[in-house]
Image (spheres, rainbow, N blue to C red):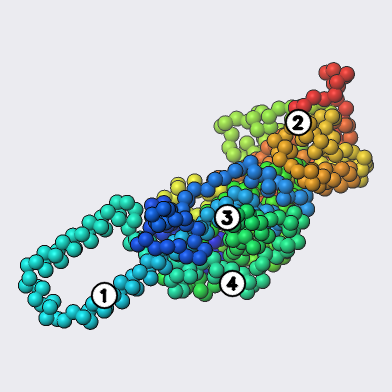
Amino acid sequence: MEDKITALFGGGGKSSVDLLHTAFLVVMVIGLILGYLLNASKLNGTSGSKGSSTDKSKDGDDKQIDPKVQLNPQADAAYLVNCLRPTSTPLEILYAIATTPDTVAITSKQLALANELRRKKLAHLANKEKEEAHKSMDDLLVSDGWAEDDDDDPAAAAAKKAKEEKEKESLRLAKATGKDTTDFLKMKLEGVDEGVLGQEWVQQNLIKIGAWPPPSFNNATVLQQKKFKVDGSGGKLVSALDHPGVQRALIMTMGRLHAKELNTHPDLVAAGPKGLIDPTYFSATMEYRQRVGQVLEGTLRMACTLRSYRLASSILDAIVMFKIGLVDVKSDGPKKWFNDLMTKQYGAEGVPKLIFGDKYLGVPAFDPDKDGIDENMSEEEKKKKEAENMMKAASKQVTTTDEKMGLEIQITRQHAESFTKEKLVMAQAQGIPPQIAMQAYREAWFILVRARKLDGNSPDLTWEGALGDSKYPATKHMEILKEKKDSLYELLDSETVTAFTKEFASPKTLCDNRIVIGWPFVISNVAQKTGKVKIHLPPPVEPGRYEFIVNIKSQEFVGVEEEFALMVDVAQGVEADSSESKKDK
């Protein structure tokens, strides 16, 4: 899905081919970059220039930059979670990820290696220019007669042959030791080779469209006071936008969010087929996109542990924004654009949408999927029997002493057939076996469940949200995490604890703010049209009528969020030991 959308951002027609060609060129040179950076040591004994991060050894040779980056995942997670608040916007979440210690360490190393490549190439070109000038002077001083005499001179011929053999041996040695400059000279670098596009080009175009400096970055509640240490500066601390590594990560972030504008830019469309793309930047953006995607998934788990509905919703929006390349997924404009794009590509029935069939919330007396269902039944008969079983199960009384409730939703993917046909066409066009194309598919959705107790038809504003165990009311969720010595809680600073404690302090806003459970489900078969999602929920510990609000949000598509509510009546159960409250389940 993402690959297809990315190609379409090229503008369709020839520009789509241009972008694919560009991607091929970028991938092709990644190996060249890595090979050179890992093996190259010095070029003609040249010295460093301003901005170079190489060191000098005692004999005057340049020391090779170590491409390895020392990462600290726990410190990175601690930084990130303490940048988050219940009110964090999708942009603030992406800004936080762009400024984590590990992210900055990676981008800073990339800059150092890229600067070293430029320094070496510039030095090599300067030396080559000197050699050419020297050769031209020799040509002026040597007459044609001398050259003709050398052709008949055995000694001159032997010397010439020896020189050629020496040059060949030097070339073989250079290749064997990783010092061959042939591949290195093929790389096109922004600031060195004319017309090459890279980070500077992206930044200048972000400025033109009003996306640089990053919108609202200096207003970000937590980030505005952050300072960052610059490598090699003796511990100097600077603001985020003054730090080269942070700036690079933010440029990559904003470049991704404005993919529509940048990928269709005439300069980029023209540069791709010519190979005028700086691989030290554009190949790094591929790695950055993968890293941000992984960190966003981890951040979503953090939000679910903290039970913050608002934060989890913002993270899910950030995932879609970054994956598709949009700066906004809430307003009508992006929704219409995406709907039109899907309609054009897949047809009206191919617009992504989940259609919900039977829904069930309660404690089933039997397994609705198995009871009375024969393997010899037709699919239609099986579905009918499952529906009957679900109705029977719904009649069972839920009590305060039940171990768990079940939430079951029958889902139909409206877009399954259209997506499958398009996937097969793409596989055929690219010469990829259909089975492999199908296996590579991934469509992720996320379910967020909240709950409220009702007083008649209105919310009961005295309910403290206890589910599963009366000892743990939802209003004291942060205290519960502390008591249980939760590993995420151990990373929180006092300001973060206070912010999330306030989020659940009032029963009046509890239902709006607190997740009962966050649950992902992934479609790995593009052709799968129907299926059933099952989730276990902790039942209420007080008798009464409850409303469970279910939100289903996509991690791939724009404007397809669905919401519905299910009611359940809970009766007072009989405790096995009335002297004890309900235990942890």
The image's mark for residue 484 is 2
Q: Is residue 88 left or right of residue 378?
A: right
Q: CA distance from mark 4 to mark 1?
A: 41 Å
Whether the residues at callouts 3 and 1 have beta carbons within 8 Å, the answer is no
Binning the other alpha carbons within 10 Å of mark 3 as few (below 14), some (14 to 19) or many (20 upward) gives: some
Q: Nearer the viewer, residue 237 or 295?
A: 237
Label 4 packing within 10 angstroms: few (<14), some (14-19), many (20+): few
Is tag 2's residue or tag 1's residue first in the polypeptide sequence? 1
* Comparing labels 2 and 1, the label whose residue is closer to the camera: 1
Residue at which label 3 appears:
231
Q: Which residue is mark 4?
A: 204
Q: Earlier in the sequence, mark 2 or mark 3?
A: 3
Q: How far separated are the C-alphas under marks 3 and 4? A: 25 Å
Marks 2/3: CA–CA distance: 39 Å
Marking on residue 135 = 1
What residue is rendered at 14% in x and 65% in y?
A: 159
State how far apart marks 2 and 4 are (Cα). Answer: 50 Å
Q: Name the quarter where the N terminus is drawn.
A: bottom right
Dot 1, crowdedness within 10 Å: few (<14), some or many (≥20)?
few
* Image location of residue 449, percent across then percent down: 76, 43
Which sits earlier in the primary sequence, circle 3 or circle 1? 1
Is there any visible trace of residue 230 in the rendered image? yes
Label 2 amino acid?
Lys
Identify the element where label 3 is drawn. loop
Where 356 sits versus 138, above or below?
A: above
Q: Please tell me whether mark 3 or mark 4 is closer to you in this view.
A: 3
